[in-house]
Amino acid sequence: MIGASRAEVCIVACAEAWRGDGEILASGMGLIPRLGTWLARRTFAPDLVLGDGEAELVGEDGVEGWVPYRAVFGIVAAGRRHVMMGASQLDRYGNQNISCIGSWAQPTAQLLGVRGAPGNTINHPTSYWVPRHSRRVFVDRVDVICGIGYDQAAALGPPGNRFHEIRMVVTDKAVLDFQSPDRGMRLRSVHPGVSVDEVVAATGFPLQLPDQVPETRTPSDRELRLIRDQLDPAGLRDHELGR
Amino acid sequence: MADKVMSIAEVVGELRSGMTIGIGGWGSRRKPMALVRAIARSALTDLTVVSYGGPDIGLLVAAGRVRRVVTGFVSLDSIALEPHFRRARQVGAVELTELDEGMLHWGLLAAARRLPYLPIRAGLGSDVLRVNPELRTVRSPYSDGEELVAMPALTLDVALVHLNRADRRGNGQYLGPDPYFDDLFCLSAARSFVSCERVVDPAELRSGGPAQSLLISRMMVNGVIETPHGAHFTSCVPDYDRDEAFQREYAEAAASPQAWSRFRAQYLDADEAHYQRAVS
């Protein structure tokens, strides 16, 4: 089998975010995270519940449930969900911005708006997908805190912060997490062909670096077959990385 | 039994500048665009619009009808960023109350239940509280003492929603995958107007889908407007999907004032019948 592409490595890295989550709603925003949810369920996370992008839940053999938006907000509040969102900006503690760039009062670039990020991050595990790892995204301070990071959660304190968890950040270069003493962003692994220096240079704040940074695991033959033959036979995955 | 069928012009005649108007649907899905287009053509100003925002927001903002938008996002779904809204924000032409999507839901729930607020966890620790300094938190009076956001009721003067079918009395039916929040918008408003693809008799309404598809009850509704293709270019499944090509044309018209003038002249400036002929 031809070796894994960067997009395929990213899909597997995204899938890993949901490992061990059990029977919860796995929501992936964007193609690569969504393929990650489907791959996770077909392999090591068979209990995950997945949506169709509209209001239906889809099991391996067809529709198995109905969650219109009003029900999704109920599931968010109940905590039975782990979402992987996008991020226009992310800082070292995992604060995320998708609202706007510049001053909020009159932005230089209006983006989506806060969407569900405040509610997601205060209620259930949240991860992020960044298709272009760069200093534009990984900034010292985000312009608007939409998804809340570990410093904000710490300032809030218990009991309000008890459901807060930023699990993982997957980019086109690396996997990052917050498993460090001060909950600052840590380099967890670099994708095959990417150096630690390259990731450090593309990050606008000091990353926590373990003594040995492992390589992100490559997809197994079975995972590659699932991605190529069943989950994304049209090959849309390579476009999302923009290379 | 009251016959509530009315015209688009009669709905606009019920509106006043400065009103708070809630618009149903979600993003670029099942929006009451025929009514939105008519408001865009009107002389109304200073509206506050509450919406899970799509081209309803973009169009009304571009037409200069809106003072304030209350929303969690404005998106065309297949085009992530609504260009008309972006432009207005970037030149400071519109005020914004930016809320988490769940907070918007809770605000409508509070309004629909005639409560001053409902507690919600969403918003804590985020800049939603910074950019909306009027928002308050509330402490649980029970032994847990937890602090939560007190999401105020989003009480509306008028709600506008678009459904697949309705009868002349105001019972409305959705046939697509998601009711969105249309019933909540209606219950949160002093007066509600339901546009629909087709006005049918009650027997056809009953045979058209299960009882659960009868989302809107006549007790929530003041007017019914038949606007075939009236959600165009947003989706109104199963009657029609989003018109992606036209949506792109709409988005590209935000490129310059000249492009917008051309788009308006070609599609919007006359009436709904002209619009429907122009896009067919």
Image (cartoon, coloured by chain):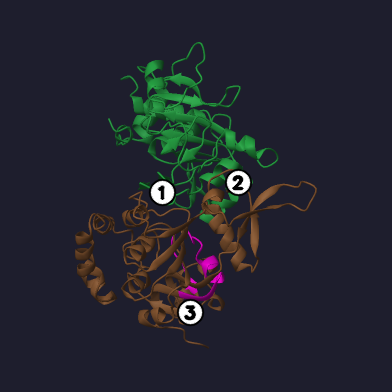
Q: Quadrant of the C terminus of chain A?
A: top left
Residue type at the position of mark 2: Leu
Query: Which SS class for mark 2?
Result: loop
Q: Which residue is found at the position 35% from the left and 22% from the top?
A: A4
Judged from this view, the residue extending furthest toward the right is: B143
Chain letter tied to green: A
Q: Is residue A198 left or right of B203 when viewed as pictured?
A: left
Subunit bearing disc 1:
A
Q: Chain of mark 2?
A: B
The part of the chain drawn in magenta is B172-193
Residue at image point 41% right, 74% down: B195
Which label sits on residue B202? 3
Q: According to the colouring, which chain is brown?
A: B
Q: Is residue A26 above or below residue B98?
A: above
Q: Give percent across and percent down for residue A218.
A: 41, 20
Disc 1 is placed on an element classified as loop
When the figure is inspected, residue A5 is found, relative to residue A141, above or below; the finding is above
Q: CA distance from mark 3 to mark 1?
A: 41 Å
The mark lying in front, picked from 3 and 2, is 2
- Are discs 2 and 1 both within one chain? no
Q: CA distance from mark 2 to mark 1?
A: 20 Å
Q: Which mark is residue B124?
A: 2
Q: Which mark is residue A112?
A: 1
Q: Is residue A114 visible?
A: yes
The type of residue carrying mark 1 is Leu
Give the label, 2 or 1, closer to the camera. 2
Q: Residues within 10 Å of mark 3 (few under 14, many from 20)?
A: some
Which-is-in-front pick, marks 3 and 1?
A: 1
Quarter residue B18 falls in = bottom left
As drawn, the residue found furthest toward the bottom would be: B1
Residue contact at pointers 2 and 1, CB within 8 angstroms: no
Q: Earlier in the sequence, mark 3 or mark 2?
A: 2
